[in-house]
Image (cartoon, rainbow, N blue to C red):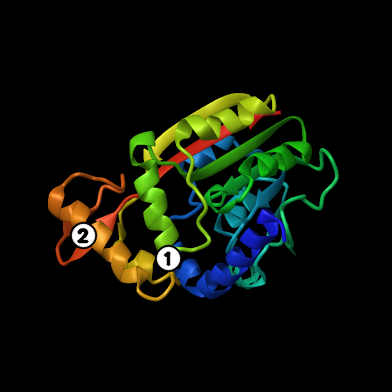
Amino acid sequence: MTQHQAQNEKILDQFTKQAEPYAKLTAAGRGASGSPFLEAMAPSGTDRTLDVACGVGRLALTLAKLTQHVTGIDLTAAMIDQARALQAEAGTTNIDWRVGDILPLPFPDGAFSLVVSQAAFHHLADPAAVLAEMARVCTRDGRIAINDMSPEPQTADALNRAERLRDPSHVRALPPSELRALGKAIGLVEIAVSSYYAPKMPVEAVLATSFPLPGDLEKVRALYLADVQNGADTLGLRAERSADQITIQYPMTSIVWRR
């Protein structure tokens, strides 16, 4: 079994369990118009769009309002089921969904003018190869856009250790400089980059989407609590106590390239 295949098994295990709670977690604001990522990719009414590792489809549904057509692909059937339910609720017709692997992408060269991926690259065994596939299926002068958890170098190791405890399908969140280097390595032209913090989320809401090994949930809680108590921000999550709960903010980076 290859490293990619082994990672796919972890993803299928985790996200089949996570599909319903993840859809609830992302109900408020994910993929909403006005987000830094959406503004940077500048979708237009003529774009044929591919959402890679689309999850429950919130970004795809937003892009369907702004582009000609959207295809969403995800490895996990349970996530696509959630996406189809949200599509039916919204009454959106210019989307199709595909359950399948993203390495390689099952589409011909140059099939899309806008190719995007959100909150997925930290789950990939070979993010460079996936970005190369995204570039392959993008038209000449089209845009490729990714948005992902992206810690600063000094907190990256600690954050990745904590995330692997919380979610065994987590591989590695890349610092902004490493994400940017992926595009440069394959000759993409960077046209927009932004690093920022996602809105505050209650820790318990995040943990409700998590299915770690026995005992690891308490270890993760202890790491968050330690950051609150000592104020060191070791994880780079801006953990703080608000009223009767701990909140965190994930560091994010969005990048748009032209092919």
First in residue order: circle 1 vs circle 2: 1
On screen, 185 above or below 56?
Answer: above
Q: Residues within 10 Å of mark 2 (few under 14, many from 20)?
A: some
The residue positioned farthest toward the front in the image shown? 1
Disc 1 target residue: 25
Depth order, front residue of 74/57: 74
* 26 left or right of 95 in image: left
Depth order, front residue of 247/81: 247
Mark in the foreground, 1 or 2: 2
Mark 1 to mark 2 CA distance (whole Å):
21 Å
Depth order, front residue of 19/29: 19
Tell me residue 142's x, y (percent). 72, 32
**Quarter of the rendering occupied by the N terminus:** bottom right
Question: Which corner quadrant of the image does residue 80 belong to?
Answer: bottom right
Per the image, label 2 sits on a secondary structure element best described as helix
**Which numbered disc covers residue 140?**
none
On screen, 155 above or below 15?
Answer: above
**Amino acid type indicated by mark 2:** Leu
**Amino acid type indicated by mark 1:** Leu
* Residue depicted at 65% across the width and 27% down the height: 185
Tell me residue 252's x, y (percent). 43, 42
Tell me residue 177's x, y (percent). 48, 29
Tell me residue 46's x, y (percent). 73, 39
* Residue depicted at 49% across the width and 40% down the height: 174
**Which numbered disc covers residue 225?**
2
Per the image, label 1 sits on a secondary structure element best described as helix
Q: Residues within 10 Å of mark 1 (few under 14, many from 20)?
A: some
